[in-house]
Structure formats: C-alpha cells, structure tokens
Image: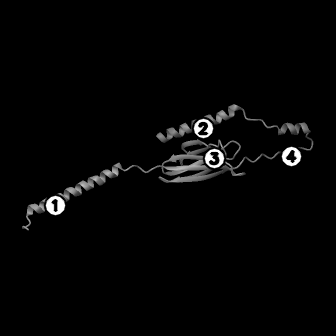
C-alpha cells in the first residue's frame, strides 16, 4: 500500500461533495413533486326524528364558515349524501318541505371520512284558535280552510337564493 497523496484526498472530497449535492437536489425535487393532500369526504345521513327513516328528496347544502355555498346535494332514497371536500370546516344545512331545517358544523380532514347525522323534525302544526262564543259553525269551517301558496311564491324564493348565491360568488372573487 502506498503513501496517500493530496490529489487522492481531493478526489474523495469532491466525490462526497458531488453525491451530497445530488442527494439534496433529489430531496428538493421530491418536495415539489409530492402530490397535494388528498381531499376528505363528507357523509351526511338525514333521517326523520319520528321513525328514524331516511327522508328521500331532502337537500343538504354544504357551506363554508362565511356561508359561501360549496355544494347542494339532493338525497336519494337511502338518505345518504356523499361529497368530496378539501380539508377544512364546513356548515351543513339539511332541509325538506314539511320539516324544520337543521344546521351542523363538520370538520373534514385530508384522506378521512367525516360522518354527520342530521335528524329533521316535522313542522309543528299551528294551534287552532278557539272559536268565539258567537261564531257560527260555517265561519269556523271557513277559518280552518288552508290555502296553498301560489306557484309564484316558491319561484320567488328560488330566485332570491340564486341571486344571493351569485352575490356570494362574486364577493369571493374580489
């Protein structure tokens, strides 16, 4: 074995420095190529409080904390609403005609499923006013008659919701 030379020492130091540099570059590249966090999933289960049965046709609105609409889901017959969401805190609002709306907060974590159970209660029937002592039976029957809302009233609500959703969308852009 011969005497180590200075040029051999320089070669080894250069080789180690080159390998360190290549390893650092690969590590940095992996940081940029790494896929972003997987979205999470939200599962909302909507049931009737009286009989714990699913409510088909109920809608679940997914809103951000500042009430920006993210999605509206109409439930199928099984009463389950599934939606993929990025990580964060959301507000769910479940509603159906004839039922009181329910709002809950849910936190979605990347790659996980957050399940929320929502129980909708039917609207409480309005108490009938007691008949007056001098009121005729025909007047009582007439007062008990309920009138259905005109189709234009429901359309007005839909237009209001559309206008509000559009306003929130443009506010989120600016």
- Tell me how far mark 2 sits from mark 1, CA to CA: 70 Å
Residue beneath disc 1: 13
Q: Residues within 10 Å of mark 1 (few under 14, many from 20)?
A: few
Q: Quadrant of the N terminus?
A: bottom left
Q: Which numbered disc flags the more N-terminal residue, 3 or 1?
A: 1
Query: In the drawing, does residue 113 fall left or right of residue 56?
Result: left
Q: Residue, x 64% and y 43% (percent of image)?
A: 77
Q: Nearer the viewer, mark 4 or mark 3?
A: 3
- In this figure, which residue is indicated by the disc labeled 4? 130
Q: Nearer the viewer, residue 159 or 51?
A: 51
Q: Residue at x 67, y 45 (%)?
A: 55
Left or right: 10, with 101 as reference point: left
Chain-order first, disc 4 or disc 3? 3
> From this viewpoint, is residue 55 visible?
yes
Which residue appears at 68% of the width and 34% of the height? 153
Between discs 2 and 1, the one toward the N terminus: 1
Q: Position of residue 94 (x, y in %)?
A: 63, 46
Give the Cα separation between the discs numbered 4 and 1.
100 Å
Residue at the disc numbered 3 = 79
> Along the polypeptide, which appears first: circle 2 or circle 3?
3
Q: Which residue is mark 2?
A: 161
Which is nearer the N-term, disc 4 or disc 1? Answer: 1
């Amino acid at each position: 074995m011969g005497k180590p030379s200075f040029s051999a020492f320089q070669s080894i130091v250069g080789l180690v420095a080159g390998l360190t540099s290549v390893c650092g570059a690969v590590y940095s590249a992996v940081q940029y190529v790494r896929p972003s966090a997987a979205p999470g999933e939200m599962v909302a289960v909507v049931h009737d409080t009286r009989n714990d049965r699913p409510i088909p046709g109920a809608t679940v609105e997914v809103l951000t904390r500042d009430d920006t609409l993210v999605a509206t889901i109409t439930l199928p017959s099984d009463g389950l609403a599934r939606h993929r969401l990025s990580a964060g805190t959301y507000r769910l609002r479940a509603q159906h005609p004839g039922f009181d709306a329910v709002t809950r907060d849910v936190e979605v974590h990347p790659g996980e499923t957050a399940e929320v159970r929502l129980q909708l209660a039917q609207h409480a029937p309005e108490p009938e006013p007691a008949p007056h002592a001098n009121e005729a039976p025909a007047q009582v029957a007439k007062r008990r008659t309920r009138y259905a809302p005109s189709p234009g009233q429901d359309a007005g609500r839909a237009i209001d919701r559309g206008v509000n959703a559009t306003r929130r969308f443009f506010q989120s852009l600016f």
